[in-house]
Image (cartoon, rainbow, N blue to C red):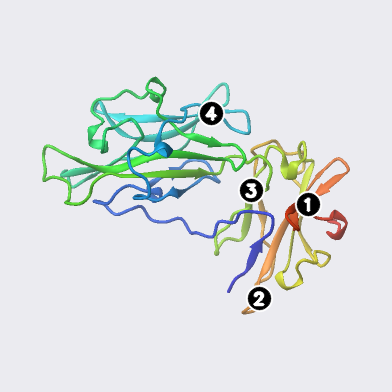
Amino acid sequence: MLKRIVVLVVAAFAIPALASPPGHPLDCSDWVFSQPGYSCSVFSNPGTIDSGSAWLKRGTNLAVDNQGFPVILRRMVTGGNSSGIRILRFDGTTEVELGRVENRTVDDAYSDEIALRDQCSTTPGGCGTLNDDYSATGEGFYFDSVNGRLLIPLISGCRDLPAGPPCPNGYGGRWWIASISGFTPLFDILQTYTPTADSLQFRVPAHPEGLRSADHFDTYWGHVSDLPDFTEAQPMQCHYPATPPAVGDYLTVADTSPAPPPGAANYTVTAVTYGTQRRYGRKLIGDLMSGRDPALLPGCP
């Protein structure tokens, strides 16, 4: 049974996956995030690009996100060798880790490893002895400020360890691009949920629905069968938060929409108010996008 569809947003339906099994290349399921709202997905699958592809070549190891905070990647080092990658953000006083992915030793025989483009030759085993400063050699990522994500060129591969048998045959190195989502986007309100969750979450964007900022938000639910008529939308939570939100605030809305009958679905939509202006997404008129008429959305008491 489909409970709801999220309108004007990109919705995430996946339940967090288990980590990849030992003896297999590290992937998005091996990332661990310390802060809420962040996730990893595959932007480019292994095998679609080779080690010489221009799409793997250096971006930068320093970006400023849409909250105005610098973001970097930092190599994790154990015993003089690379042992993983961390994503860090700096607020002017304190470094905060957003997430990490760590190498994995398999039965003291070999190591499943992950590294950045240009850090290694053909596999992570070529990394050798490293310090933790990526910026010294220029490896890094691309920051997509519109969608609020990092695109990180990576290689997942295997490294032989002295004490055990070699890496499995056919393991090889796998070049791919990870998309780390959860940063504040530039315009849209993103709401994400899992099928078993009872709430909606989104991070306040820099310019919600293109407005300079937000005074408050209102979230509604309705029956998909009513669309595109929003006059029947029902308030779910009104005039939140209590004070004007800051860019990057992670807001949670309790889902009070009822479970629809089999074959039906609900939608949710969030409106943003700034001064006298109110917006709740866009619609396609011919080949052009235009804002929906805010007068069609009921008031939120």
The kind of secondary structure element at disc 4 is strand
Residue drawn at 71 percent across, 70 percent down: 224
Q: Amino acid at mark 1?
A: Ser
Residue 64: horizontal and vertical position, in percent?
Answer: 57, 28
Residue tagged 2:
264
Q: Amino acid at mark 4?
A: Ala
How many numbered marks, from 0 up? 4
Quote the CA–CA distance across marks 3 and 2.
25 Å
N-terminal-most mark, 1 or 2: 2
- Location of residue 228 by image quarter: bottom right
Mark 2 Cα within 10 Å, few/some/many (few <14, many 20+)?
A: some
Cβ atoms at labels 1 and 4 below 8 Å apart: no
Q: Is residue 15 above or below residue 90?
A: below
User: Which of the pair 108/82 is nearer the observer?
Assistant: 82
Q: Is residue 269 left or right of residue 75?
A: right
Q: Is residue 189 above or below residue 136?
A: below
Residue tagged 3:
202
Q: In what quadrant of the picture does the N terminus appear? A: bottom right
Quote the CA–CA distance across marks 1 and 3.
23 Å
Q: Amino acid at mark 3?
A: Phe
User: Which of the pair 6/291 is nearer the observer?
Assistant: 291
N-terminal-most mark, 1 or 3: 3
N-terminal-most mark, 3 or 4: 4
Residue tagged 4:
63
Q: Is residue 10 left or right of residue 55?
A: right
Quote the CA–CA distance across marks 3 and 4.
22 Å
Residue tagged 1:
290
Which of discs 3 and 4 lies nearer the camera? The answer is 4
- Location of residue 84 by image quarter: top left
User: Which of the pair 223/144 is nearer the observer?
Assistant: 144
Residue drawn at 58 percent across, 32 percent down: 65
Mark 3 Cα within 10 Å, few/some/many (few <14, many 20+)?
A: many
